[in-house]
Amino acid sequence: MEKKAWQTLLAAVLAAVSAYARELLIPVLVLFAVMLLDYGTGVAVAWKNCELSSRTGLIGIVKKVGYLAVVSVGSVLDYILRISGERLGRELPLSNYFGLLVTIWLIINECISILENADALGLPVPAFVGAALERLKKRSEEETPGEQV
């Protein structure tokens, strides 16, 4: 019975999140997928180099959870702006602007990391893809104030 209660709660939470953040759901799922892939390739690189460490692995997991927290902060900012606009009699045309920007930025960073890990594993990575993503990463870091997450 307890298992059914957890399943019901999870279904209700996912339904509420998907109803609120329709435009954000697919990018967040993509982010989750690339985070898993990045973590897996990072573990493979550490294993190949005989550098496996549970502490480093735990730090990586905490970092990925932090990514989701940053996306949540962007979504909260979007919500505050939308509610403030409504109270002031102005409707904003974009509903998940900051949440999407943060999510896309993190997806790009994760993809760059996956390519770096693939290269470290000796897998073939097209030079033009790596160069294009590296330029994009440098550009996003130049335009983003503060330290990269």
Image (cartoon, rainbow, N blue to C red):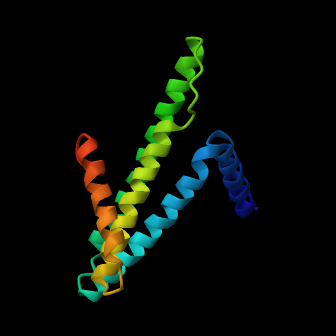
Instruction: Measuring from the top left, give residue 89's x and y in whole percent.
Output: 60, 11
Q: Is residue 63 above or below residue 140?
A: below
Q: How many marks?
A: 0
Q: Nearer the viewer, residue 114 or 64?
A: 114
Q: Is residue 116 above or below residue 20?
A: below
Q: Nearer the viewer, residue 73 or 132?
A: 132
Q: Nearer the viewer, residue 91 or 147?
A: 91
Q: Is residue 93 above or below residue 131?
A: above
Q: Is residue 104 above or below residue 122?
A: above
Q: Is residue 137 visible?
A: yes
Say which quadrant the N terminus sits in.
bottom right
- Tell which residue pokes out farthest to the top in this image: 88
Instruction: Measuring from the top left, give residue 134's x and y in whole percent.
Output: 28, 62
Q: Is residue 61 visible?
A: no
- Tell which residue pokes out farthest to the front in this image: 128
- Specify the quadrant of the image occupied by residue 95: top right
Residue at the spot x=60%, y=51% of the render? 25
Instruction: Measuring from the top left, give residue 84's x and y in whole percent.
Output: 53, 18
- Specify the quadrant of the image occupied by residue 27: bottom right
Instruction: Measuring from the top left, give residue 19's x and y in whole percent.
Output: 69, 42
Residue at the spot x=35%, y=58% of the render? 63
